């Protein structure tokens, strides 16, 4: 973040503008929508400006003594520098239009919805990008949000007495903005909306906790679903695992309490039963809990066990699916999991033994079915059992030269792809063991993979047989 977006109250404040022409006119148009008292100086300029009577001179340092901040708006760089020097002598915060190197702060592109304003800033480096981003946001924020903001402005002064604790007020706002009061406000029935909201604030009901099992997808933050993003922004508590990257956590609510419960092979930082207890405990405190899992919660994510534990404890639970790793890796590598000519079916299996103990918990799978020709087999967590997987499939009829694509850190910037065949798979992984989570795509479709300059194949390409 190059700059920190701030909100500057202007009620009863004086703002000074120094400049000429269209550059000054654009800033005047913006600032006239605020309650600030505006003083305008236009040296060497006789242009008429709507709504103001400018002074046709340079201000003095004394003229700036009670200014909250000053905006200098000249197309001519030399005049902009002259204005900046004057303002610095007065020790006032300074914005210089289109010359960010001369100023102290930048004015963002603004979406104006009455009391609700949204700023889009690029640190002064790309104002056109900020304007285009603003345009897209404006399309997504309906004008009725101005009515909702007016409702919030009128309701807010009453809440400190009714709900003295900040957490109470935060939860009240989260609930009321999803209530009938908010709907009425958006329809313009603000008096009625305020009455309903105040009645709810005077008689607050205990909040019921809830747990959302949310799929974070295969790694690329842009593959997160819209619902998952909304739940992350609303969560009081986020319980997340090792496969959830920083890019996704950066989109979560900033002040949410976070619990890391990451797991690696045979190394569970928090045992599963303790995760169950944590989810139940936080929900019983009336909190909105997001259990954030890599991929999809119900595809080798132990989501079913967590749902059972939560229901047994009487906790409300909801599931939000995510893009599972098999689908993410298939898309990232352009390898279809089914293909009319090469694979008419697909199976997802885990190569991870229960409790990580392969010696005492062998992979008891229907190997004969999994070894079928023209069938794609996707193996999650199969790196450490690749030797057994290779042997079992070949023993049950799979050709030794069946192509295998190993995708490490799928959909992420550090994705690595290894193309090999079934008989060579164990040696390929021993020679260059993956350092991140990896997926095996076994079957004729793997030979359709085409290496690129960004992702060259580590091993020799296989051929469809």
Image: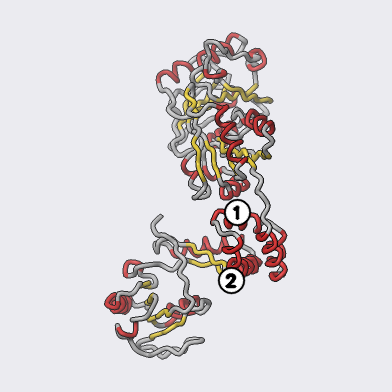
Q: Is residue 36 above or below residue 255?
A: below
Q: Quadrant of residue 59?
A: bottom left
- Residue 68: percent from left, percent from top: 39, 76
**Colouring rule applied to residues:** secondary structure
- Residue 259: percent from left, percent from top: 50, 38
Please name whichever residue, 416 or 353, is drawn nearer the observer in this view of the structure.
353
- Residue holding disc 1: 171
Q: Which mark, residue 345?
A: none
Q: Is residue 127 above or below residue 371?
A: below
> Quick one: which residue is furthest to the top in this view?
395
- Residue holding disc 2: 114
Query: Relative to residue 266, is residue 142 drawn left or right?
Result: right
Q: Quadrant of residue 57?
A: bottom left
Q: Residue at x 58, y 40 (%)?
A: 282
Which secondary structure, mark 1? Answer: helix
- Residue 181: percent from left, percent from top: 70, 62
Residue 401 appears in the picture as rendered: yes
Q: Residue at x 51, y 32 (%)?
A: 450
């Amino acid at each position: 973040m190059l700059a920190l977006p701030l909100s500057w109250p202007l009620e009863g404040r004086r703002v000074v503008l120094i400049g000429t022409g269209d550059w000054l006119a654009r800033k005047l148009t913006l600032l006239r929508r605020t309650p600030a008292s505006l003083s305008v100086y236009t040296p060497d300029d006789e242009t008429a400006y709507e709504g103001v009577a400018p002074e046709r001179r340079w201000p003095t340092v004394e003229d700036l003594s009670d200014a909250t901040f000053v905006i200098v708006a000249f197309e001519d760089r030399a005049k902009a520098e002259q204005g900046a020097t004057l303002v610095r002598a007065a020790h006032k915060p300074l914005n210089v239009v289109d010359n960010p190197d001369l100023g102290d702060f930048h004015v963002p592109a603004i979406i104006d919805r009455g009391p609700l304003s949204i700023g889009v800033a690029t640190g002064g480096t790309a104002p056109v990008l900020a304007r285009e981003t603003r345009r897209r946001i404006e399309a997504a924020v309906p004008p009725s949000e101005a009515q909702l903001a007016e409702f919030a402005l009128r309701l807010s002064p009453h809440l400190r007495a009714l709900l003295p604790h900040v957490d109470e007020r935060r939860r009240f706002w989260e609930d009321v903005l999803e209530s009938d009061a908010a709907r009425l406000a958006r329809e313009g029935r603000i008096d009625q909306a305020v009455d309903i909201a105040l009645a709810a604030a005077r008689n607050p009901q205990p909040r019921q906790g809830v747990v959302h099992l949310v799929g974070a997808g295969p790694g690329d933050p842009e593959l997160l679903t819209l619902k998952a993003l909304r739940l992350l922004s609303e969560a009081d508590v986020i319980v997340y695992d090792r496969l959830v990257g920083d890019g996704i956590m950066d989109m979560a609510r900033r002040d949410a309490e976070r619990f890391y419960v990451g797991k690696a092979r045979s190394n569970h930082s928090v045992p599963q039963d303790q995760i169950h207890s944590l989810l139940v405990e936080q929900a019983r405190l009336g909190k909105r809990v997001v259990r954030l899992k890599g991929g999809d919660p119900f595809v080798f994510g132990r989501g079913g066990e967590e749902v059972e534990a939560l229901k047994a404890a009487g906790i409300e639970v909801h599931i939000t699916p995510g893009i599972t790793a098999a689908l993410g890796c298939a898309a990232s590598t352009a390898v279809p999991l089914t293909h009319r000519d090469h694979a008419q079916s697909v199976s997802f299996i885990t190569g991870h033994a229960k409790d990580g103990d392969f010696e005492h918990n062998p992979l008891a799978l229907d190997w004969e079915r999994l070894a079928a020709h023209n069938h794609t087999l996707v193996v999650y967590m199969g790196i450490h059992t690749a030797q057994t997987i290779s042997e079992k499939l070949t023993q049950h009829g799979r050709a030794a030269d069946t192509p295998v694509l190993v995708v490490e850190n799928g959909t992420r910037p550090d994705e690595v792809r290894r193309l090999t065949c079934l008989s060579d798979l164990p040696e390929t992984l021993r020679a260059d063991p993956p350092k991140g989570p990896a997926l095996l795509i076994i079957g004729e479709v793997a030979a359709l993979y085409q290496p690129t300059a960004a992702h060259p194949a580590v091993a020799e390409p296989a051929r469809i047989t």
